[in-house]
Image (tube, grey):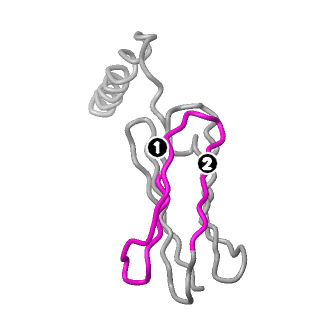
Amino acid sequence: MRKKVLCIALALLMCMMVTLPTLADGSAETPLNKAYIAASYGVKSVSGSTYKMWAKLNNPEGVTVVVVLSLYDASYNYITSISKTSSSTIISLSKDVSLSSGTYHLRLSYTAGGATYTSEKTYNI
């Protein structure tokens, strides 16, 4: 019984040591969570061999975001990219590219709040 009480008291003490300094400092920054930025991106046909690579990020917190949208061929040879830095609540970027039939990899990478997030999609054209 003593061990249980001691373990519970120790656990509570550890929780207080972690949370109280943060609560006491009103100037502490709120860490940016990936969930605060919703991203969508893709490649869509415009006409003939012209395609549009695009990305749209919803940034409700209005933090500064650096966005890079890159296109690679099937062997991951670089084709092109577009980038933008913005603190707008909606960040959009697009670029027309000429593509022949084949497999392509579209990679979205964005940095916000000191953290970088990357996602990739594969397209067969």
Residue 11: quarter of image? top left
Q: Position of residue 105 (x, y in %)?
A: 48, 74
Residue at 67 percent of width and 72 percent of height: 44
Tag 1 residue: 66
Crowd tier of the residue under label 2, counting other residues whose Cα lies within 10 Å: few below 14, some 14–19, many 20 or above: some
Q: Nearer the viewer, residue 107 or 8?
A: 107
Which of the two discs, 1 and 2, labels the residue nearer the N terminus? Answer: 2
Magenta residues span 68-97
Marking on residue 33: none
Residue at 43 percent of width and 83 percent of height: 74
The magenta stretch spans residue 82: yes
Tag 2 residue: 57
Looking at the rendered structure, the kind of residue marked 1 is Val
Q: Is residue 45 left or right of residue 107?
A: right
Q: Is residue 52 above or below residue 108?
A: below
In the picture, the quarter occupied by the C terminus is bottom right
Circle 1: element type: strand
Characterize the magenta stretch by its predominant secondary structure.
strand
Crowd tier of the residue under label 1, counting other residues whose Cα lies within 10 Å: few below 14, some 14–19, many 20 or above: some
Q: Is residue 54 left or right of residue 115?
A: right
Q: Nearer the viewer, residue 84 or 90?
A: 84
Looking at the rendered structure, the kind of residue marked 2 is Leu
Q: Position of residue 48 (x, y in %)?
A: 69, 83
Q: Is residue 117 above or below residue 24?
A: below
Q: Position of residue 4 (x, y in %)?
A: 32, 33
Residue 59: quarter of image? top right
Q: Position of residue 118 (x, y in %)?
A: 44, 58
Q: Is residue 108 above or below residue 106?
A: above
